[in-house]
Amino acid sequence: MKIDILTLFPEMFDAVLKSSILGKAIEKGILRVGVINIRDFSKDRHRRVDDYPYGGGAGMVMMPQPLYDAIKSVKDKSPDARVVLTSPRGKPFDQEKARLLSKEPHLVIVCGHYEGIDQRIIDTMVDEEISIGDYILTGGELPAMVIVDAVARLLPGAIGSPRSLEQESFTNGLLEYPQYTRPADFLGMKVPEVLLSGNHKRIEEWRRRKAVEITRRIRPDLLAGKGLEPEEPGH
Ligand SMILES: C[S@@+](CC[C@H](N)C(=O)[O-])C[C@H]1O[C@@H](n2cnc3c(N)ncnc32)[C@H](O)[C@@H]1O
């Protein structure tokens, strides 16, 4: 898979793209990431990329020209590339969206700044707007990193044990059950007996019960439509 990130702050991606699973996926050639500086496309004498909003109001808006040319430079070579704009106005990013994006051969992620980008670019060059949550960040770089990370770990070969993808939170619509590792007794706190039993059926049932319990307590909204009541009967 290829991901191109369009940003005013390319240096922000250096550490993230070199480290951990993302770094390894890139090293193995499972993922190719291009970081493109939008400012390089500015035709302004001073390489400006922002201007005052028509109609007045606070802050600046990213001008259409540098963004248009930056996106076009990718689309000219790869017309089917899917263009995603990071935006608090977008659809909320979730595991299902990560899964869908991981099937795209070529993704372009546009990082906004200031008050956002000129609407004409959104109308003509952007396929979808994605938000990573109901809060406002200073720029689209952190959201782009979140999207790249969530997508990359779903690519075949990116994760050492693909089974962990099947069992983790959200994949089956539940939050994950509690995890323990050695020692079995840490400062008097014991690992639940069932996990030491070697009885896989009992372990499976315990994990499922815990996952439902945790989801019911923390995210009852996830249970709706799963045939599981958001509240314990009698509560
Ligand atoms: C300060 S924000 C602009 C906020 C915009 N004026 C609004 O009210 O919707 C600057 C840029 O950061 C990015 N951004 C901020 N919060 C985000 C979020 N929750 N999800 C995705 N992108 C976000 C977007 O690219 C946005 O264009």
Image (tube, rainbow, N blue to C red):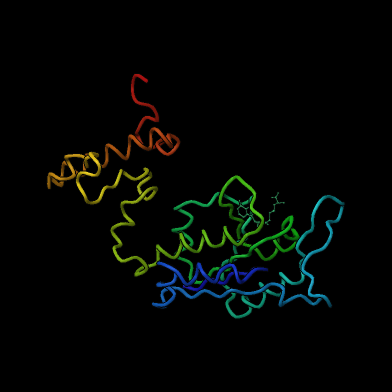
Residue at x 50%, y 64% (from the top left corner): 148
Q: Indicate the quadrant where residue 214 lies.
A: top left
Number of marks in picture: 0
**Would you place residue 61 above or below residue 180 in this image?**
below
**Would you place residue 168 above or below residue 30 in this image?**
above
Furthest toward the right, the residue is: 55
Residue at x 57%, y 77% (from the top left corner): 78
**Would you place residue 38 above or below residue 141 in this image?**
below
Q: Is residue 65 left or right of residue 90?
A: right
Q: Is residue 35 left or right of residue 66?
A: left
Q: Position of residue 227 (x, y in %)?
A: 35, 34
Q: Indicate the quadrant where residue 199 lies.
A: top left
| Residue nearest the viewer, comparing 30 with 141 | 141
Residue at x 84%, y 78% (from the top left corner): 45
Q: Position of residue 163 (x, y in %)?
A: 28, 58
Furthest toward the front, the residue is: 187
Furthest toward the top, the residue is: 234
Quadrant of picture, ligand 1? bottom right
Q: Indicate the quadrant where residue 164 lies.
A: bottom left
| Residue nearest the viewer, comparing 225 with 2 | 2
Q: Is residue 85 left or right of residue 165?
A: right
**Would you place residue 60 above or below residue 48 in this image?**
above
Furthest toward the left, the residue is: 198
| Residue nearest the viewer, comparing 141 with 163 | 141
Q: Which quadrant holds the C terminus? A: top left
Q: Position of residue 162 (x, y in %)?
A: 30, 62
